[in-house]
Image: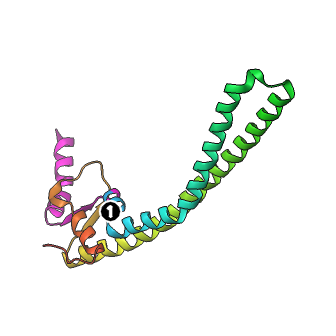
Amino acid sequence: MILGAAIGLASAPVAAQAEGSKIGFVNTERILRDAAPAVRAQKKIETEFAKRDQELSRTADQLKKLQDEFEKNGVTMSEAQRRNKQREMSELDVQFQRKRREFQEDLNQRRNEELAQVVEQANRVIRQVAEAEKFDVVFQDAVYASPRIDITDKVIKALEGKPPAR
């Protein structure tokens, strides 16, 4: 009983202090998905990597065509022709896998670079909104946040150059 009273008294100042605080929440995932700078960054990356993606698709089609051809004609080929065709398919597959891995690594690196810029810009805007609206703390990402304290839409509008609604 004494322990319960002590805990209650110890938490009272924290609760009283929290009541006067203004808290906000921002969903970073939504910003990185919906905000204009994030959409522009995604389109920029898609454009930048489109040629390599098409090249990979052509190589995959070529590999599939070779495999289909081998399955269709493999029984009528001589042993030497079969080995040569298998070697050709194997070399093409190794080349394809390497190019695909390099493509994915380059794509991830570019996406991270572009999104880092968006996050940096979003953090500046979050600070501006927080200061303008006198927030004591703004959390990014949480297990749960009430829509009442969610300022994500304001941040997205500010990132698009629109004045935030009050």
* Residue 36 relative to residue 165: left or right: right
Q: Residue at x 22, y 53 (%)?
A: 145
Vertical side of 118 occupied by 4: above or below: above
Q: Residue at x 26, y 74 (%)?
A: 158
Residue 7 included in the magenta stretch of the image = yes
Q: Residue at x 18, y 60 (%)?
A: 149
Q: How is the image coloured?
A: rainbow
Q: Residue at x 77, y 39 (%)?
A: 88
Vertical side of 6 occupied by 124: above or below: below
* Residue 65 relative to residue 87: left or right: left
Corner quadrant of residue 61 = top right
Position in image of residue 155 (x %, y %): 26, 69
Corner quadrant of residue 120 = bottom left
**Magenta segment range?**
1-29
* Residue 149 relative to residue 53: left or right: left
Position in image of residue 29 (x %, y %): 35, 56
Vertical side of 125 occupied by 31: above or below: above
Corner quadrant of residue 160 = bottom left
Position in image of residue 33 (x %, y %): 35, 59
Quadrant the C terminus occupies? bottom left
Amino acid, disc 1: Ile
Which residue in the protein does label 1 denote? 31
